[in-house]
Image (spheres, helix red, strand yellow):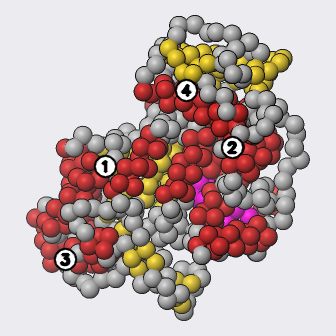
Amino acid sequence: MKKTLYFIMGLILMIGGCKSGNAPFTGKALAIIPAPVSITEMNGDFIFSGKSKIILSVLDSETRLAADCLADFVRNPTGIDLSVEEGSKPVKGSVFMTLDSAINNDEGYELTVTPKKIVVRAKSAVGLFYAVQTIRQLMPVEVESPLVVEGLVLSVPACAIKDEPRFGYRGMHLDVGRHMFPVAYIKRYIDMIALHKMNTFHWHLTEDQGWRIEIKKYPNLTETGAFRKETLIGHGGKKPFTYDGKPYGGFYTQDEVKEIIAYAASKFITVIPEIEMPGHAMAALASYPNLGCTKGPYEVQTRWGVFDDVYCAGKEETFNFLQDVLTEVIELFPSEYIHIGGDECPKTRWEKCPLCQKRIKDEGLKNESELQSYFVQRIEKFVASKGRRIIGWDEILEGGLAPEATVMSWRGTTGGIAAARQKHDVIMTPSTYVYIDYYQCEPQGEPLAIGGYLPLEKVYSYNPMPGELSQEEQKYILGVQGNLWSEYLSTPVYMEYMAYPRMFAIAEIGWAPDRLKDFEDFLARFEAQKKRYDAIGINYFKGEYRDTRAQAK
Ligand code: ACM
Ligand code: ZN
């Protein structure tokens, strides 16, 4: 039944999409996304044979991941089982992967393909893995086939590539609170992150409309908090509200969470969990009503928006609860960073709550903004005591930043600029450029979205480094992330439709030097790689990629 639904949804999306406005294919031979820093095309092709091997200068569990990834892409469509072995020099007909401390960037690599051999140099295993992603994109699309393709010649065009990322943080976010997606789809999302040389998956796990991660100490979070009684029909800004009358919910067990973290790690991707506080907490409050200022009763929310009921900042019980939750989260996730949310927290309840007011008085705080800052700083101390660091949305600037906090700038770039000037690390994720839940073309005929207008060209135009910052301040800009909020993404098919190809543009702005960015060239490479995305089977948007509103001006 579910499968049929996704299929029908897919058909609707395909038929109902915007008018085609694809770029004419300009014949880019080496269509790599994100664009490498330097690339020289040479004559001839390397061809994998039954005698080919993968030779690693250092064979350990990390370098083996890169080698195995390449071996899988060769084995699946050809049946050729490349041996992976340790060795000190290249061999004719084989791939030689070597770790080389002369390469500057931790994630950088150099790839030389000749008809005789392939040689990859990288500072570390992740660079080898990224070279494999490049080799993959250079091979015929049949490498994406899980089954043997009769008569396939697996060739790689001769070339010399030197490559490294512009930013160390290149992330994609996914909200599973509003709608959740099967583990298999999250793995596919991670596959796409890896194929495009991004290194972080920010997993937004708790929301007003659903708590999605099993916490052993607090079973109500998933017994109660993971389910809502129904879901809003239509847009959240449109009254009167009507609902579908269908219960919705689910959660990821700790075993599933571990499976996803391990899967991501095998592709050199860090998973950053987000546990929202003090706002966007209705599902937690519905599960444990004592954690709110009014004690409820509360309900897991059935419509989208921002809600007045948030964690009570006056109660010790709130901090004990959150510390227990974070303890389990930190045990599960090896990520240095733990995202604690911090956005969109109304102060309405805190203004009236005697315990919150007492806290303000006792701690000598000026107002409720400082109370939020107190809240975040307390959580930061706890997270730091476990050897980890916090990230928060840019509202955590209000009332004073926690001393070591990293800021995600989402309300434009102002918060990011302010944080960098305060010598805090920043990840740029402005809604104006990288909120890919926004419409990607004119909304007429499109499936319902939250609003906005963010075509591929506009996403691509974003430069994550704010020009306003001095060179010294620019060091605090760690990178860029695309955000995918799921209020309106009720199926995985629609989730993919919104994610791709805008994710690929975000990958390129995080990787390629700004001087190399060229939208027409990017479009041509995307056009050339569409066969690969088709072979992988993702549902990417096929309509107008250009910013027609900008052109109309
Ligand atoms: C956000 O979009 N509320 C971070
Ligand atoms: Zn309170």
Q: Are marks 4 and 2 in contact (CB under 8 Å)?
A: no
**Sequence-first tag of 4 and 2:** 4
Local crowd size for mark 4, using a 10 Å CA cut-off: few (<14), some (14–19), many (≥20): many
Q: CA distance from mark 4 to mark 3?
A: 52 Å
Residue underneath mark 2: 147
What residue span does the magenta drawing correspond to?
431-441
Q: Position of residue 9 (x, y in %)?
A: 68, 72
Q: Is 416 in front, or is 470? A: 416
Residue underneath mark 3: 290
Of tags 2 and 1, which is closer to the observer?
Answer: 2
- Give above or below for 112 relative to 380: above
For badge 1, the amino acid type reads Leu
**Which residue occupies 41% across, 80% down?**
228
| Cβ at disc 4 under 8 Å from ligand 1 | no
Of tags 4 and 2, which is closer to the observer?
Answer: 2
Q: Is residue 1 magenta?
A: no
